[in-house]
Image: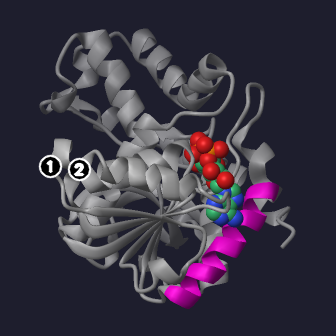
Amino acid sequence: MVNTITVVGAGNVGATTAQRIAEKELARRVVLVDIVEGVPQGKGLDQWQSAPIENFDTRVIGTNGYAETAGSEIVIITAGIARKPGMSRDDLMNTNAGIVKGVAEQVARTSPNAILIVVSNPLDVMCYVAKKVSAFPRERVLGMAGVLDTARYRAFLADALDVSVRDIQAMVLGGHGDTMVPLVNYTTVSGIPVTQLMKRERLDEIVQRTRGGGAEIVSLLKTGSAYYAPSAAAVQMAEAIVGDQKRVLPCSVWLEGEYGHSGLFLGVPCKIGGRGLDSVIEVDLTPDEKAALAKSADAVREPMAALTF
Ligand code: APR
C-alpha cells in the first residue's frame, strides 16, 4: 500500500479508477481532482460512503486543486474530452494536449517523485506531452493502452473459443489506435498456440474487432467512450507499481532504440515494478509484425509533429 494515489479527471474513467483503487486498498488515500466544482467532491464522498459496505479503509477525497495531492506516489491522468461517434482518438489531440500540459505542470510541482500513468487520448501523444512538460525520466511516465487492447483481444478470444479468459495469454503492441499490433504468434491458450485452436480467418476477424474495440463501444454508447475496461487496465498497472510486482504488461513507453524506434511513445512489452518501468522486453517479431509496428510508429509520429504547445 502507498500513501496517496491521485486520479486527475473525475469523469467516467477517472471516477471508476478511483473506486477500483479504493476497493483494492492500493493506497491510504485516493485524491480525485477535476476542474468542475463539486463533482470530484460529490463522487469522492459517494465512494467513501460505499466503504462500510465494501469494507475498505482507503479515504476517497475530491478536490479542484493540487494541494491535497502533494507527494502522491502515483498520478493517473484521465482528464480530457472523450470521443463521440465518428471521431478518431486523434481528433481529441489539441484540446487534450492543452489539458494534459496543465495537469503535468501541476503534478510535477506538487508530486515531483510521482509515477505517471497516462490514460487521456490520443494516448501515445499525450504521454509525450506529459513527459516533456513534467521532465520526468522515462521510468516514471507510462501510458495505459496495451493492457486494455490486450484485454479486449483476450475477451473476444475467450468468447470465440468458449474458454476462461484466465487461460488466454496475449500481447497487443503498437500505438493505441487502428494500427495496433496484436501478436498472434505469441497468443496462447494455457501454452497452446491459438493458431492450433482456431482458423486463421476467424483469428483475423478477432484482430480486426480488437483494433476497432474502442470505436465499437463509442458507437454503442453514443455519448462518451469506454471506461470499465480502461479503468481496470490503469489500476492493474498501478497495482504492479504498488506491489513492486514486476508484471510483464504491454505499456506505452518512451523508446530509446528498442524495436528499432526512438523518440516516441509506443506500446511494447514492459516489466513494471516499484520504480515504474523496470525494463522493456524485446521479443522476436516476424517481418510482417515489424512492418506493422513501424506503421503504427508513423501513426504516432504524425500527430506528435502537429502538436502546437
Ligand atoms: N483538470 C482536471 N480535470 C479536467 C480538466 C483539467 N484541466 N479538463 C477536463 N477535466 C475533466 C472533465 O471535467 C471531466 O470530468 O476530465 C473529465 C473527463 O471525463 P469524461 O468526459 O467522462 O471522459 P472519460 O470517459 O473519463 O475519458 C477521459 O480518457 O479514455 C480516455 O479518450 C478518453 O481522453 C479521454 C479520457
Q: In which quadrant is the C terminus drawn?
A: bottom right
User: Identity of the amino acid at label 2?
Assistant: Ala
Which residue is depicted at the point 18% across and 16% down?
163
| Residue 26 sits in quarter | bottom left
Q: In which quadrant is the N terminus drawn?
A: bottom left
Residue 153 in percent (x, y) is at: 39, 29
User: Identity of the amino acid at label 1?
Assistant: Asn
Residue 148 in percent (x, y) is at: 42, 41
Residue under pointer 2? 51
SS under mark 1: loop
SS under mark 2: helix
| Residue 166 sits in quarter | top left
- For this rendering, which residue is in front, 6 or 296? 6
As displayed, is residue 53 above or below residue 235? above
Residue under pointer 1? 55
Secondary structure mostly taken by the magenta-highlighted segment of the chain: helix
- For this rendering, which residue is in front, 265 or 257? 265
Residue 68 seen in render: yes
Q: CA distance from mark 1 to mark 2?
A: 5 Å
As displayed, is residue 214 above or below residue 12? above
Residue 246 in percent (x, y) is at: 20, 66
- For this rendering, which residue is in front, 260 or 157? 157
User: Looking at the image, do the residues carrying marks 1 and 2 touch, with CB atoms under 8 Å apart?
Assistant: yes
Residue 192 in percent (x, y) is at: 15, 27
Which residue is depicted at the point 26% across and 57% down?
248
Q: From which residue to which does the magenta span run?
A: 95-110
